[in-house]
Amino acid sequence: MPTPSSIDENDHTTKVQGLFIQHQPEIRGFVLAMIPNFSLADDVMQETFLIVTKKAASFEIGTSFAAWVKTIARYKALEAIRARKFDTLSEEVLEALGSEPHEFAGDTDERLVLLRGCLDQLAPQARRSIDYRYQNENLPPQIASLMGCTVQSVNVTLSRARTFLRECVQRRMASNPNLSHV
């Protein structure tokens, strides 16, 4: 039978996990700024969520969730960069980027608005693949099974869709000079 303190602890953990989910797009953007690889960024997001859950008791509700979670995400991203040894910004630059405890911009991030518009322009199969991968968190073998195609086909479709989305957002940002600061 759960004790009152374990119920309080579970409730606190649930609240912290809720904050993570609420700020997930911003956290993902922060991780992608350090690791420009969607698949690896997904891995870092999952590892960050696990640490956030494990250390939820050390977070005080009402303090800066952004600063706390960015610190965790930055360390997990640096671990991933070291383990995989791929080209990215130097560790000093990455440390400097993550050292400012800025709050997240919330739903006002213009890039998310642009991305939503670009998602509507994807071909139906590409859109389904993106939805399976990033909304339902299915892996390519699972997506292949759901869509009745090969894993290689899913990987190609996802790669082309990500390229299209990146270029679409960049075009829209370039066409609106007010967004160049984003």
Image (spheres, rainbow, N blue to C red):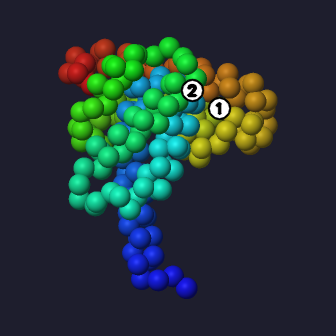
**Residue 75: image tag:** none
- The kind of residue on which mark 2 rests is Ala
Residue 115 in picture, x, y percent from top left = 41, 31
Q: Reading the chain from its start, which is encountered first: label 1 or label 2?
A: 2
Element under disc 1: helix
Q: Quadrant of the C terminus?
A: top left
Q: Quadrant of the N terminus?
A: bottom right
Residue under label 2: 83
The front one of 2 and 40 is 2
Dot 1 crowding, Cα within 10 Å, few <14, some 14–19, many 20+: some
In the picture, measured across the screen, residue 167 lies left or right of residue 144, that is left
The front one of 67 and 104 is 67
Please report the residue visible at 45 percent of the width from the left and 29 percent of the height from the top: 78
136 relative to 175, above or below: below
Residue 145 in picture, x, y percent from top left = 78, 40
Q: CA distance from mark 1 to mark 2?
A: 34 Å
Residue under label 1: 125
Residue 121 in picture, x, y percent from top left = 50, 27
Please report the residue visible at 60 percent of the width from the left and 44 percent of the height from the top: 137
Report whether residue 68 is seen: yes
- The kind of residue on which mark 1 rests is Gln
